[in-house]
Image: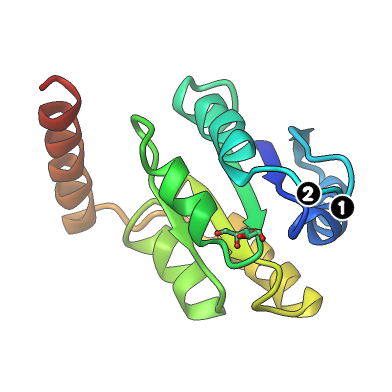
Amino acid sequence: MKIAIGADHAGFELKELVSQFIRETGHELIDMGTGSSCAVDYPDYAEAVAKAVSDGKVERGILICGTGIGMSIVANKFKNIRAALCNDLFTAKMSRLHNDANILCMGARVIGKGLALEIVKTWLDTPFEGERHLRRIEKINTIERKVLDK
Ligand code: RB5
């Protein structure tokens, strides 16, 4: 898969670890920053990754900030984005099975490195279940069109 990743200063260190893990598993990764632990604003990185997913330049995105909340708020403003804040394994799995989440958000100040890598692995490996969940995704898309076309 082609995956974009982004983080703010709070998520920088975890982003480096997750990036290495993703590259080792054979996925193509585009790192959209930030490049250090110097303070930056999370909306800039959420925008870059969400736009890449929304425009179809990459299949999936991963965003990391302190809590994952700011990243998910911004990412979900974009068309075709289903960003899921997953700081546990069950949520990560369900966000793929039922919600076909295309952006994973995590909080580097909430979870440890080992759990974060397990969440990433689960999230990348779990397929969308489809069926009744597809109908619900279609309803999300209808709402999105109504809201954005207003
Ligand atoms: C940065 O201090 C922090 O606010 C940010 O990383 C994130 O947690 C926002 O949701």
Q: Nearer the viewer, mark 1 or mark 2?
A: 2
Is the CB of the residue bearing disc 2 within 8 angstroms of ligand 1? Answer: yes
Residue 55 located left or right of residue 147: right
Mark 2 crowd level (few <14, some 14–19, many ≥20, 10 Å Cα): few
Where does label 2 land, which residue?
A: 39
Which residue occupies the foreground of this view, 120 or 85?
A: 85
Going by the numbered disc 2, the residue's amino acid type is Ala
Which residue occupies the foreground of this view, 41 or 112?
A: 41
Residue 18 located left or right of residue 123: right
Q: Position of residue 61 (x, y in %)?
A: 59, 42
Q: Quadrant of the N terminus?
A: top right
- Residue 51's tag is none
Residue 134 located left or right of residue 127: left
Q: Position of residue 98 (x, y in %)?
A: 32, 61
Q: Position of residue 75 (x, y in %)?
A: 46, 42
* Figure check: 23 above or below 57: below
Residue, x 75% and y 68% (percent of image)? 117
Residue, x 87% and y 40% (percent of image)? 35
Q: Position of residue 34 (x, y in %)?
A: 79, 40
Which residue occupies the foreground of this view, 98 or 84?
A: 84
Going by the numbered disc 1, the residue's amino acid type is Ser
Mark 1 crowd level (few <14, some 14–19, many ≥20, 10 Å Cα): few
Q: Name the colour scheme.
A: rainbow
SS at badge 2 = loop
Where does label 1 land, which residue?
A: 37
Q: Which image quadrant for residue 146?
A: top left
